[in-house]
Amino acid sequence: MSIRKISAIFLFVFVITTLGNDADAAQKKKEVKQKPLPVSKYKGPKDQDIKLGKEYAVQVEKEMHVVPNEELTAYINRVGKRLVDSGLLDRDFPYTFKVVQEPSINAFALPGGPMFVHTGLIAAADSEAQMAGVLAHELSHVSLRHSMSTSSKSSTVAGLGSLAGAILGGLIGGDLGELAAQGAQVGTQAWATKYSRTAESEADLLGSYAMAKAGYNPLELGTFFGKLEKEMGGDPGKTAQWFSSHPNPGNRNVAIQEQAPFMAQGPFTAREGDLAHMRQIVASLPKSPVGGITAKAVPANSPAPEFKISQKDRQLDAGGFSLSAPDNWQAGSDSQGSQLLIVPDGGPIEGGGFGAGILIGTHQPKNAKTLQDAHQELLQSLIEQNQGQLQASGAPQAQKVGGQNGLISRMTSPSPYKGETENDFVVSVPYQNKLLYFIFIGPTSRWSQLGPVYSKVIQSVKFAAK
């Protein structure tokens, strides 16, 4: 036999063998095994979960606006009870369900079972199954005691004062995915719980099983996650909160789809009410206190009050950066959910707006090539938003923020307090391809009281290491 023929035969055998091996590998790759349902790795006493969860729930209800609508609350409780009755979640915890008026798309559950569902989630879900999926995911974190496990690694809970530390993130929106998000996240991150990807995978798995057992299509959970990811490109302020504390473990939609054949197979006909009607109730709710803030409001055109300033500060840890503020000032989102507010009693004005406090947000420069250009663009945007009532006073000055170069400008505007001019000091600094800004607001007559507080706040800003 010639060398040429031997080579041809070898090549033929090699190709057939290789193709066969590839086919075997592909077949093996398609074989999906059922994953065992996760169980809690934390073995501490469950009474501690319940005790701490109740304590945090009290604080959450002080800092967020709980919707008093009985029909809406009863509906959410029916959905939650159906999931708990699936039998897959830990029944030792006294799960409770309340609705909070907050436009961000989220729900959160505290240790031991208190759950708070944002009106933004009810408004955004396309089906009851999608909403139930988010609830099932959060209930799974409780059942698996993920927050307790996280807190035990850092010895003890940071304390009720840290509740507002989670407020910074999606409010500031945009690419600030690292920030613990949105104003009403006060309770969500009370534990500084940015769940690990492993914890997320476990909550996805247990939650989807509980959905299926309760009569909801588990694939709707993956569908809703996909919707949230798309929302990040449209209105990130409404979704950043979820992703900041719930990092995508990777291919979560595929993971749910692969395990779906091992779950209850329906019929997926669960329906505890008319979601469209519930959305109408949400849309018709009276305007809540700004961002859930319940700091004492004063009538417009009343004298500027003496602001109470605690000598103790609390850390507001935003993931991407942190700052300190007086621990008797409240934090929350503005009415659009796009900025963070930190205000003292007497700062809010009856009927809307506020005359003293701190605004934090981001601005996306359009044509700026330098920090100075971006800063000026921000000032012009603020002037336009305030219909020309806000005016710049003097040239911008250099200002360090968290060790980085920033700028500060003094602006003035009419104050809502009687006979006052309002100072508005605008500080900006580059951050994640945007301009992070802080606006320090207060009447001129009280600036000797507020100014030192604001200086301390801006000096406390620290950016997380990249």
Image: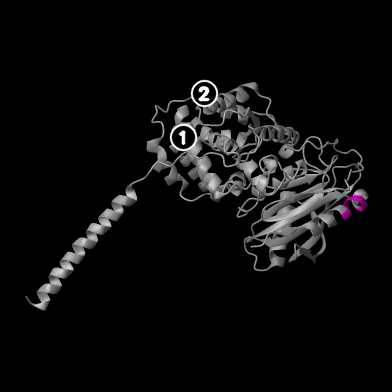
* Badge nearest the viewer, 2 or 1: 1
Name the side, left or right, on which 325 lies relative to 320: right
Disc 2 marks a residue whose amino acid type is Glu
Residue designated by label 1: 209
Residue, x 70% and y 41% (percent of image)? 186
Residue at 50 percent across and 35 percent down: it is: 130
Q: Would you say 271 lies left or right of 349 here?
A: left
Q: Where, quadrant-wise, is the N terminus in this rendering?
A: bottom left
**Residue 410: horizontal and vertical position, in percent?**
82, 58
Nearer to us in this view, 436 or 86:
86
Q: Mark 1 belongs to which amino acid?
A: Tyr
Report how far apart the C-alphas of labels 2 and 1 lie in the structure.
Answer: 19 Å
Residue 14 belongs to magenta span:
no
User: Could you tell whether 419 is left or right of 275 in the image?
Assistant: right
Q: What element carries label 1?
A: helix
Kindly tell me whether residue 167 is visible in this rendering: no
- Over which residues does the magenta segment extend? 448-452
Left or right of 21? Residue 408 is: right
Compare residues 401 and 424 and report the one nearer the observer.
401
In this rendering, is residue 53 above or below 12? above
Coloring scheme of the render?
Answer: one colour
User: What label does residue 366 carry, if any?
Assistant: none
Look at mark 2 in the image and give the residue it sits on: 272
Q: Are marks 2 and 1 in contact (CB under 8 Å)?
A: no
Q: Which of 423 and 295 is in front in this view?
A: 295
Picture quadrant of residue 295: top right
Tell me residue 322's x, y (percent): 73, 54
Q: Identify the secondary structure beneath mark 2.
A: loop
